[in-house]
Amino acid sequence: GAVVSQHPSWVICKSGTSVKIECRSLDFQATTMFWYRQFPKQSLMLMATSNEGSKATYEQGVEKDKFLINHASLTLSTLTVTSAHPEDSSFYICSAASGQGLFGYTFGSGTRLTVV
Amino acid sequence: QKEVEQDPGPLSVPEGAIVSLNCTYSNSAFQYFMWYRQYSRKGPELLMYTYSSGNKEDGRFTAQVDKSSKYISLFIRDSQPSDSATYLCAMSYTGNQFYFGTGTSLTVIP
C-alpha cells in the first residue's frame, strides 16, 4: 500500500531557531499533501494544504510566514517552522493524497517538536 | 463549540468485550464519517468510512452514523489486545478536508 515517510520523528530545538520537517510519498506521486498539528489532548487540526508547484493554502489562524511549506516535487513536501518558540511545541503530521478516494489519504508517522 | 467532540478516555476492556466508541458533531453539512486507528508513534490509518447515514460492517468492526442526532459510533466485537490503540473519528464535507476528534485511547487487556 501507499507509504508516507516523515522525518524527523522527533526534534528538540532552541527557541528562535528554525526546524524543517520532511514528508515523502515513497511509492506514489502526491499532487496534494496536508499538514496537521496536534496539541496534547486536542484534535488533529489542519494547518495547510500543499499542492505541487504552487503556493500552499493555509487555514485561518495559521501564520504562513512562520510555517513555510514547500511542495517542490510530487513526492516531497516540507514544513519549516521558522523562529520557533515554546508555544510551537506540538505534534506535526502530514498526509498525502494518492488519488484513491478516502482510503488514498495516507498519513506519515508524525514529528514531535519540542522547543526549549 | 468544537466541530467534533470525542471522549478521550482512556478506555480499558477485557479481551473479548464489545467496545463502543462515539463522537458527536455540530455541523449538519458533514457527509463523510471516518474512523482512524493510530498505534503509538505511527500515523493514523483509515479503518472505515461511511457516506451519509447508515451502518457499515467490516469483520469485527461496525460503523454507525445517525445524522439526525449528529452522532457516530464504532463498535468492535470480540476485542483483541492488538486492537489497543487510539481511535480517531473524522468528518468531512467533501472527502478532502478532515475534521478530527481528539481520539479515544483503548486498551484491551488479555
Image (tube, coloured by chain):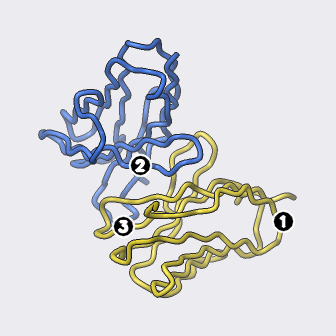
Chain colours: A blue, B yellow
Q: Position of residue A65 (x, y in %)?
A: 23, 28
Q: CA distance from mark 3 to mark 1?
A: 32 Å
Q: Are marks 2 and 3 in contact (CB under 8 Å)?
A: no
Q: Amino acid at mark 1?
A: Glu
SS at badge 2: strand
Q: Amino acid at mark 2?
A: Met
Chain letter belonging to callout 1: B
Q: In the rendered view, tell whether residue A53 sits above or below residue B46.
A: above
Q: Nearer the viewer's eye, disc 3 or disc 1?
A: 3
Q: Position of residue A79 (x, y in %)?
A: 32, 31
Closest to the observer, B6 or A95: B6
Quadrant occupied by the N terminus of chain A: bottom left
Q: Which mark is residue B92?
A: 3
SS at badge 1: loop
Identified at 37% across, 78% down, the residue is B28
- Residue A97 appears left or right of B1: left
Q: Nearer the viewer's eye, disc 2 or disc 1?
A: 2
SS at badge 3: strand
- Residue B34 appears left or right of A40: left
Q: Quadrant of residue A85?
A: top left
Q: Which residue is mark 2?
A: A45
Q: Which mark is residue B37?
A: none
Closest to the observer, B70 or A34: B70
Identified at 46% across, 62% down, the residue is B1
Q: CA distance from mark 2 to mark 3?
A: 13 Å
